[in-house]
Image (cartoon, grey):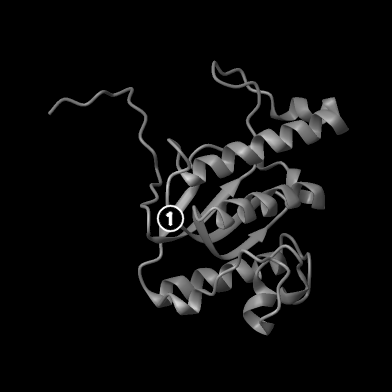
């Protein structure tokens, strides 16, 4: 069987109906998500896709330059994958907000590509299938402890970081209506 050496192969693939740990990183590790307005774009998109029945979100954290999710893709959004819709919608919203705030900051995301002028997310987001309870809970802990990492030191306790599902898992309280409990899945 002949293969095309120039054919692009995705590193991560998400199968509909399965639960995955997902990481998406801002292009060049820039800290675009430092401001809450940009984090809210991510939250609002997750909420929309969840309410539309396209995804189930079990856990998340939005860091200054990346996000981690535990989610399940339930259906396509028309012809595109739900994760594709998520990345595309948030990129368009980031562009619109940056254009209004600072044209200089927008140029940091400029690319010379035939299909786009700006790239906000690095290509090939990481997706790891969570096939056992142990693996799922390890990733859940990783997500919730991320803001306390040496590199970040954003909070001293996971519950104190607002843009995370940690408080939901410890207290049952959340202001993120789209969250579902991972413990009910395994």
Q: Residue 172, how many percent across, how many down?
A: 66, 81
- Category of crowding for the residue at label 1, using alpha-carbon neighbours closer than 10 angstroms: few (below 14), some (14–19), many (at least 20): some
Q: Can residue 6 be seen in this view?
A: yes
Q: Quadrant of residue 146?
A: bottom right
| Point 12% across, 29% down: residue | 1
Q: How many marks?
A: 1
Q: Is residue 112 above or below residue 162?
A: above
Q: Is residue 91 above or below residue 182?
A: above
Q: Which secondary structure, mark 1?
A: loop
Q: Residue 59, how many percent across, how many down?
A: 58, 66
The residue closer to the viewer here, 76 or 104, is: 76
In the visual, does 158 lie left or right of 48? right
The residue closer to the viewer here, 182 or 10, is: 182
Q: Is residue 114 above or below residue 50?
A: above
Q: Residue furthest right?
A: 101
Residue named by callout 1: 74
Q: In this view, does 59 lie above or below 51?
A: below
| Point 40% across, 43% down: residue | 11
| Point 42% across, 50% down: residue | 75
Q: Residue furthest bottom?
A: 171
Q: Residue furthest left?
A: 1
Q: Is residue 28 visible?
A: no
Look at the image and tell me in which quarter the C terminus lies. bottom left
Q: Quadrant of residue 31?
A: top right
The residue closer to the viewer here, 110 or 100, is: 100
Q: Residue 12, how many percent across, how many down?
A: 40, 46
């Amino acid at each position: 069987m002949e293969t095309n050496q120039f054919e692009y192969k995705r590193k991560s693939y998400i199968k509909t109906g399965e639960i995955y740990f997902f990481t998406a990183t801002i292009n060049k590790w820039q800290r675009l998500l430092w401001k809450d307005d940009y984090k809210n774009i991510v939250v609002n998109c997750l909420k929309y896709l969840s309410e539309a029945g396209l995804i189930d979100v079990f856990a998340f954290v939005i860091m200054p330059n990346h996000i981690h999710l535990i989610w399940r893709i339930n259906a396509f959004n028309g012809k595109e994958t739900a994760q594709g819709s998520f990345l595309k919608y948030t990129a368009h919203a980031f562009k619109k907000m940056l254009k209004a705030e600072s044209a200089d900051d927008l140029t940091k995301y400029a690319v010379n590509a035939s299909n786009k002028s700006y790239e906000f997310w690095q290509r090939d987001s990481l997706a790891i299938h969570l096939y056992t309870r142990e693996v799922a809970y390890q990733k859940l802990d990783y997500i919730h402890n991320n803001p306390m990492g040496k590199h970040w030191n954003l909070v001293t306790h996971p519950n104190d970081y607002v843009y995370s599902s940690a408080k939901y898992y410890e207290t049952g309280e959340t202001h993120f209506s789209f969250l579902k409990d991972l413990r009910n899945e395994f």
